[in-house]
Amino acid sequence: MAKTNPTLRYPAEYFTNPENSIGYLARITFRSFSRLLERGTLSHGVSSGQWRFLRQLWREDGITQRELSERVGMREPTTVVALKGLEKAGFITRRKTDADRRKTFIYLTPHAKKLEILLAPINAEVHQIATRGMSDEEVAQLQALMRRVIANLADETAKLTILSDASA
Amino acid sequence: MAKTNPTLRYPAEYFTNPENSIGYLARITFRSFSRLLERGTLSHGVSSGQWRFLRQLWREDGITQRELSERVGMREPTTVVALKGLEKAGFITRRKTDADRRKTFIYLTPHAKKLEILLAPINAEVHQIATRGMSDEEVAQLQALMRRVIANLADETAKLTILSDASA
DNA sequence: CCGATATACTTAGTATCCTAAGTTCAAAGG
DNA sequence: CCTTTGAACTTAGGATACTAAGTATATCGG
């Protein structure tokens, strides 16, 4: 994190305007999307946070908490709290095996499984609204560019983690 | 929010994979960016949440809380809590006027003003890392596309707000 | 087979961010 | 004036998400 860097794409002042910052734009995009989505899901008793876990479990349930955390893109303590809420709401059950008694497997209840038919279209509709006036190519481009940013940041974070682990 | 919609760009099943969802991608982008940024700012006693307010105040201070909320992209109650923290940390002061005693104006302390020289480059560097391997055109495209998504979602939210206000 | 290490999850504590419902003050219409 | 409406901020309460540090169980090297 040098003070001056001649190879910078943009000078530091460029980001005085948050509208230029990818971090800012991503935050506003996420919050706006999430708010609108919740307007639709809340009437089915599902918050936007719960939605994120349900979506993954619709793809595949019977996976461990750790696996679920990774797929949803959240840390394990966040998952613990979220799953408590989901269990209390009757959306999931947790099961242990004797094979490895550390692991907890997460299963959807029949009720939660049925919700996919109702909730998946709501998400698709929000996506539709979000990309209104954009061509298919532009949508694909946006997705691809965000994935590249995520990969770049993950690489860097991994690098830093290795460094701090080595010094420990 | 119809169950089936023949004009949908993608069928609902497409979003079973979160990697296709703009909401998911924006969330991961934001969190990754924020995490890396905080690694740099925390050593100066600034959290990523505080950073967001400071960046705006570096542009212009002496504005009201409401104005600041809008520019940062957060709701007012969030701003109240954030400003309490910033005041406690010695980054800002609040001042009232007799002209309109409802308004509170926010000013940076000299210390906080000085931090810009140290912190702005850190943000630029994170941005640099995030866009590694991307052309200037691609970066501009990503910014433009996210702005369009934000505008689309804001339009829709405004529409819904008017509707619910009318029925109230 | 047993101590060191790693894995899976939990707890504790905190920061961030929201909605809903206040309070206080200003402005506008009758 | 003085009531209504609106604007600016606050309070209350909860959801979301994190880091750091714990517990319990499994695995692996000697």
Image: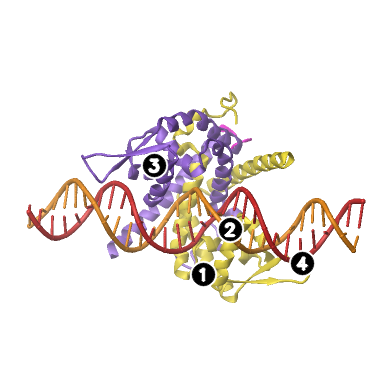
Chain colours: A yellow, B purple, C orange, D red
Check the image and report above or below for B30 versus A87: above
Q: Are marks 3 and 4 on the same chain?
A: no
Of B53 and B131, the residue lying toward us: B53
* Residue A134 in sight from this viewpoint: no
Q: Which residues are magenta?
A: B131-136
Residue A118, disc:
1
Please tell me the numbered disc located at residue A78: 2
Find residue A100 and name its label.
Answer: 4
Amino acid found under the numbered disc labelled 3: Arg
Chain ID of residue with mark 4? A
Q: Residue at x 65, y 39 (%)?
A: A156
Mark 1, other Cα within 10 Å: few <14 / some 14–19 / many ≥20 = some
Give the vertical position of C28 relative to A54 (above or below).
Answer: above
Q: Main secondary structure of the magenta part?
A: loop
Query: Disc 2 versus disc 4: distance between alpha carbons?
Result: 23 Å
Where residue A82 appears, as percent x and y from the top left, is 56, 63
Q: Amino acid at mark 1?
A: Leu
- Mark 1 and mark 3: span between their CA atoms? 36 Å
Residue under numbered circle 3: B71
Q: Dots 2 and 4: beta carbons under 8 Å?
A: no
